[in-house]
Image: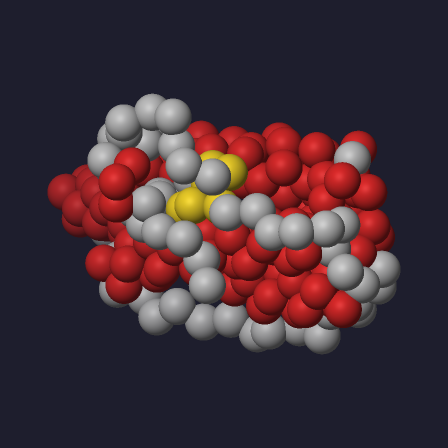
Amino acid sequence: MNRATSTLLVSAFGIALLVSITDNVRTKTRANLMAAYSCESNARAKYLAYAQKADREGYGKVADLFRAAAESEKIELNNQALVIQAMGGTPRTNIKHHAIRSTRKNLVDAKNEETYETAVMYPQFIAQAQKEDNEDAVRMFTYARAAEVQHVKFYEEALDNLNEWKSGKTEFRVCPICGYTVQAKPVFLACPVCATPTRLYESPR
């Protein structure tokens, strides 16, 4: 093998290795998007079931909160699906069986899950997407994390004042673009996360 042939082979190997590394990096963010999509799909199904349980136990306000959170999760997973499709993937999920316990325990479960997402999962996903310069993935992960942070606050408030959340109803409104959730009518004119006018916020049914 002459030197020119050797150099050509080395160069070809280097190009192949670069392509392999690039594909692997791209796969990481797409895999993260798929994981987030599955996570939010399961959360939505679970929160709708938790809302029914809260209604049966007489916690009308908690039921409203879970329905608002479920609507927010739907917006998040739809956002993530769009990026997955733009990257050439197909969104897939497997809805798992979720144990439905008391409303208090369901609130604790929801709080713990979304605390993990805001503190660990989404920060890692955002960092990886930034490394790959995938602005769409960064934006959708950032939207989801901001919405989940707000959910955690509501879950904590409900747990700290559960008796007060037992009677009546509470209106929650959800940003149709990023899923940011507020209680009653927003006091600001535009969504603090994505700048969508709050007059477009939706009330979950």
Q: Is residue 52 left or right of residue 99?
A: left
Q: Residue at the spot x=17%, y=46% of the render? A: 8
Q: Position of residue 145 (x, y in %)?
A: 49, 37
Relative to 122, residue 189 above or below: above
User: Picture quarter containing residue 118?
Assistant: top right
Q: Residue at the spot x=49%, y=46% of the render? A: 172
User: Picture quarter containing residue 101?
Assistant: bottom right
- Closer to us: 35 or 163: 163
Q: Is residue 50 left or right of residue 134?
A: right
User: Picture quarter containing residue 134?
Assistant: top left
Residue 96, can we see it?
Answer: yes
- Closer to us: 141 or 28: 141
Q: Position of residue 109 (x, y in %)?
A: 76, 50
Q: Residue at the spot x=54%, y=34% of the render? A: 150
Q: Is residue 80 left or right of residue 41?
A: left
Q: Position of residue 36 (x, y in %)?
A: 50, 53
Relative to 195, residue 50 above or below: below
Q: Position of residue 35 (x, y in %)?
A: 52, 56
Q: Is residue 47 left or right of residue 68?
A: right
Relative to 192, residue 47 above or below: below
- Closer to us: 197 or 60: 60
Relative to 192, residue 56 above or below: below
Q: Residue furthest front?
A: 168
